[in-house]
């Protein structure tokens, strides 16, 4: 099985390494449940993870729980960051919540 990469900005390195960040929200993905991924933050490997699930939701349906699992304090903070990375995002945009479990 080919290992895929999940790339993150450098500022997410610590929470990826600690295992506190257990999801990522993306507009596009080819990942599916069971995939093995290398977690890479700012070009540095933070280890490997197994994709547990991939869920499709509208941005307007994102919850506080979704935000916390993604390493944010609340939905407002999450939406601010999503808009920074995906300028075209609207409440009606569909996103994928990729839940993963770090491998030891």
Image (spheres, rainbow, N blue to C red):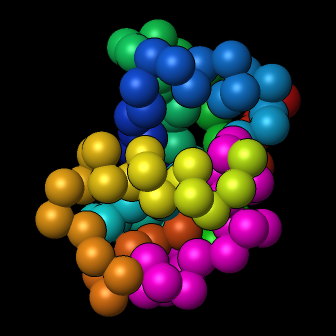
Of residues 23 and 49, the one nearer the viewer is 23
Most distant residue in the front direction: 76
In magenta, the rendered stretch is 54-72
Q: Is residue 57 magenta?
A: yes
Classify 6 as above or below 8.
Answer: below
- Residue 41 locus on image (x, y percent): 47, 21
Most distant residue in the left direction: 88
Q: Is residue 49 magenta?
A: no
- Residue 2 locus on image (x, y percent): 41, 46
Of residues 15 and 45, the one nearer the viewer is 15
Q: Image quadrant of residue 10?
A: top left
Q: In the rendered view, does 75 fall on the left or right side of 26?
A: right
Of residues 94 and 87, the one nearer the viewer is 87
- Residue 37 locus on image (x, y percent): 52, 43
Q: Residue at x 78, y 67 (%)?
A: 65
Classify 43 as above or below 29.
Answer: above
- Residue 92 locus on image (x, y percent): 32, 88
């Amino acid at each position: 099985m080919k290992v895929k990469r999940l790339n993150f900005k450098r500022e997410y390195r610590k929470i990826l390494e600690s295992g506190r960040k257990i999801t990522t929200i993306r507009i596009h993905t080819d990942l599916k449940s069971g995939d093995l991924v290398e977690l890479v933050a700012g070009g540095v490997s933070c280890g490997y993870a197994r994709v547990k699930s991939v869920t499709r939701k509208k941005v307007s349906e994102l919850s506080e729980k979704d935000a916390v699992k993604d390493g944010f304090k609340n939905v407002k903070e999450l939406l601010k960051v999503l808009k920074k990375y995906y300028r075209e995002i609207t409440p009606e945009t569909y996103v994928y919540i990729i839940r993963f479990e770090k491998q030891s």
